[in-house]
Every structure is written in C-alpha cells, then in structure tokens.
Amino acid sequence: MDHMVELDIEKYLENGKLIVKETCKRELTDEQLTVLTKDILLALNMYGGDFADANIVEMTKQYMRSGGIDRCLKM
C-alpha cells in the first residue's frame, strides 16, 4: 500500500523497557516487560505520538489507571 508506514520499534524497545519498568513499579518478567512495552509503543504510534521518554511515561500511567497493564499481560 502506498500509505503504509513500516515501524521498527525494536530500536526504541530497550529504552522503553527501562522507562516502563521504572514508571509502573511492578514485578514483571523480562518477557512480560517486553510485551507490555511493545504494546505501549504501538499505542503511542497509533495515537500519533513519538517515542519521547515523557510520552512513554504518560502512556504507561494511562495503562496503569485504566487496567491496561493487566489486560495486556493476560493476552
């Protein structure tokens, strides 16, 4: 498709994991943290945001308030 954007979140993943782990303050396995961080990064992209540290913090807080972390980890 002409208007598709391929997003490589892998280059943002390690920094994102550090931010998500620090923000949510939950005991997560590395696998859980990876799944959660990817979901948060994809949500940021969907909402048109970039992967700035402050945006990752705010999206993580939204996940915490809305129960998104538990929903994400159940999948």
Image: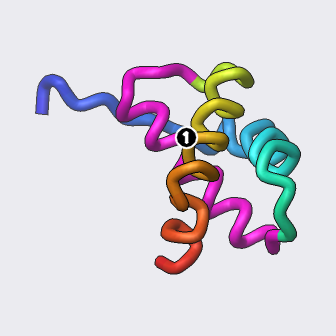
Amino acid at dot 1: Leu
Q: Image quadrant of residue 11?
A: top right
Give x and y (percent) for residue 8.
52, 38
Q: How is the image coloured?
A: rainbow
Give x and y (percent) for residue 73.
58, 73
Asked whether 75 or 62 is in front, the reply is 62
Residue at image location 66% in from the left, 20% down from the top: 52
Image quarter (top left, top right, bottom left or bottom right) of the N terminus: top left
Give x and y (percent) for residue 13.
69, 44
User: Does the magenta-highlighted stretch encompass residue 33?
Assistant: yes
Residue at image location 47% in from the left, 21% down from the top: 49
Q: Which residue bears the numbered disc 1?
A: 41
Is residue 14 in sight in this rendering?
Answer: no
- Relative to 4, is 48 on the left or the right? right
53 is higher (above) or lower (below) than 13 = above
Q: Residue furthest left?
A: 1
Judged by its main secondary structure, the magenta piece is helix
Is residue 36 in sight in this rendering?
Answer: yes
Q: Give the structural element (helix, strand or loop) at label 1.
A: helix
Q: Image quadrant of residue 25?
A: bottom right
> Which span is picked out in magenta?
28-50
- Relative to 7, is 13 on the left or the right? right
Asked whether 61 or 10 is in front, the reply is 61
Number of residues whose C-alpha sits closer than 10 Å to that of mark 1, classed few (under 14), some (14–19) or many (20 or more): many
Residue at image location 31% in from the left, 29% down from the top: 5
Asked whether 15 or 68 is in front, the reply is 68
